[in-house]
Image: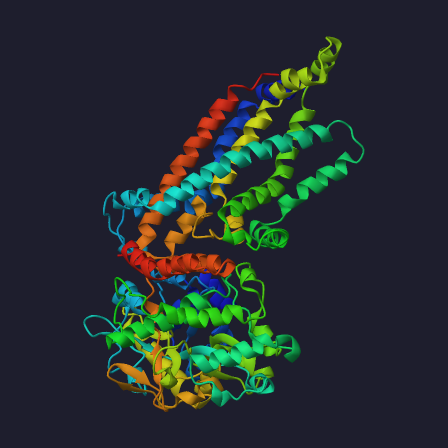
Amino acid sequence: MKKTNTKKASFKTGHSSMTKRSLRKWAWLFIGPVFASFIIGFIWPFAQGIYLSFCGKFNVISNARIQGFENYVKAFSDDTFLHAFGFTALFAVVSVVLINLLAFAIAYALTQGIKGSNLFRTVFFMPNLIGGIVLGYLWSMIFDGLLDLWTSQNLVDNATYGFWGLIILLLWQQIGYMMIIYIAGLQAVPDDMLEAAKIDGATKSQTLFRVIIPNVMPSITICTFLTLTNSFKLYDQNLALTGGKPARLTEMLALNISNGYSNMATRGMAQAKAVIFFIFVAALGIAQLAATRKREVQQ
Amino acid sequence: MAGAALAGCGGKDSGATKSEASANGGSVYWLNFKPEIDETLQTLAKKYTKDKGVEVKVVTAASGTYSTTLTAEMEKSNPPSLFVIGNQQGVKDWGDFALDLKDTAIAKELTTDAYNLTDANGKVVSIGYCYECYGIIVNPDLVEKAGHKMDDIKNFDTLKTVVEDIHSRAEELGFDAFSSSDMDDSSSWRFTGHMANLEYFYEEKAAGKPWTECPATITGDYLPNYKNLYDLCINNSLTAPTDLSAGGHNAEEEFINGKAAFFVNGSWEFAAVSKKVPNAVMIPYYCGVEGEEKAGLNCGTENCWAVNANVSKEDQQATIDFMVWLVSDPDASKTMVEQLGIMPYKNVPTSTNTFLNSLGTLKTENNFKFDGNGNYIMDWATNYQPNVDEYRKDLVSALNAYNADQTDDNWAKVKEAFVDGWAKQFEAIK
């Protein structure tokens, strides 16, 4: 695959100074609408959110008054928040490992030229097309039906069931999507490298670990990033499947934050939690990208 | 409808701005919190505009989003002129935005001020436009079919006898005593919100004075009575207690299809129930408290109108005129009563809701309310539940554990959520 080379070449020769000038002139017309909606829909509310996290009790935003760090102090001394943090972290670790292992394994199997590969790819991808709320309700019925076979407890009665229920749901939903990314990665491994490995007498596992995996590192980077942030941000599945029951033990971070917003007295604290949440997820995402990028190889 | 929907999401509404130039110079914007009455209100709004030439916009917040919608709408340059402040927490949060309704034209239409909400300074922040009651809805035909008489049910012991007898013979009779008491979010409020009221109310009654603000702690003295009725519901029902946490049963359908004789719910169910069970009646929460033969229904309201103090004088006047029209125009008030049950206004027709027939005219004595038969009304102390969503969530979890395994230990956890949970949530939002 010589994608990168051709790209560079076209960049060098394809643009005359004329087109560059008109691009510069018209760029704002094209970027403008997106940029404006990004500011209106993201940057402005985000800035306002940070401001509100420092405010005392408020009903409308114009009545909010700066109060200091009290909301942050309250957030960190809120047991439910700390529990949600721990629960979410554990959930993220388990789901990131399982989703990526399984998605890679399926992608690998489906690129070996088995009959009906295309059908399987479609089937595995399909769960990803269903919305989280619908999935949550459907799976809660499936789980309750299954649990009924050997216990009188339902999914919402037991935090352990709730945890694994969420894991199973997320695996079912996301493996297909990650599989597609891995398949693209696997298909991009240069044939000449594989051929060279074969000629040199490498075994199947040597080929996998020494040739294929280093070559699909970009896919691994993007998949771990997606699964990690998805797990941390998980909301609708959590809301629909367990709703945090029992006793808020299966409440994840996003749900914990939104629950706090309903009451005026805890609104500012919920906002502070959201800021903490953002900083944490952003830092984690950047750290993960930096760590896996280092292992990517140049083709 | 489309205009209202658009105004719900958009910023400034051009329609309303235009109307400021209309007949009396004012316009009405009602932020309604009950999705089930939206259609009626839209029709009435159109009719009013047609008859009087005053623009009326009704926007209904989606179920469960009233408080966030109000937060967003109040910020706009054209905020609601008419909105709802339904309880003391609402008075604290939104009281500053409300016009004092004392001595206004609409206040003069009232037959009772029992459902008005006032703030600490005596300002009438909002006035009730209808009130509702809850208790146990009974199908008398089924009770009689099982060989009992409705008149036999006078207190907890007699209720228990009838219920347990029906449950024990459910197979032979072809129906059971109670419809399902699901603990999912679509149904758990009947037990964590409504039935819990009996405990709070009897605490108030024992103290001799209704609460006027959320107490920091409750005693839980009447929790054994709550347990009496709760146990009766879950153990003599179509659905086994262990299946309640998952939900998925439709208690209303079970009742109207004659599969169960008892249904824990309120007066708003009348329209749905009376179609198939025209004789249905509502009885109080009998729970084994001394003197409960004189108990009445749980009556109260969160349907209280507040007028925005921050809109123009013209808009305030137009809004009050509209409110008066709703409760005095023969057609409009008839439509309102059909939708809302009882409205405490001089010129509205009598309600056709037979669940509320027994009430008659309410009287207030020593701060407590009594119905026309002299039975004490159980007021909605439950409206004071602190940090209500979180409080109820914890209670649901504890009740689920108890439903799965009815031990004393598990009931102790219910008590913890009920009593200690109150204090905890009170602290959380202090």
Q: Residue A156: horizontal and vertical position, in percent?
A: 51, 53
Which quadrant of the figure has residue A109?
Answer: top right
Q: Residue at x 62, y 21 (%)?
A: A213
The count of marks equals 0
Q: Residue at x 33, y 61 (%)?
A: B419
Q: Residue at x 55, y 69 (%)?
A: B180
- In this view, the residue farthest toward the right is A115
Q: Residue at x 27, y 67 (%)?
A: B95
Which quadrant of the figure has residue B283?
Answer: bottom left
Q: Residue B156: horizontal and vertical position, in percent?
A: 43, 79
Report the front residue among A255 and B219: B219
- In the figure, is residue B271 to the left or right of B53? right
- In the figure, is residue B140 to the left or right of B120? right
Q: Residue B328: horizontal and vertical position, in percent?
A: 39, 88
Report the front residue among B12 and B264: B264
Q: Residue A153: horizontal and vertical position, in percent?
A: 55, 54
| Any part of residue B117 in sight | no
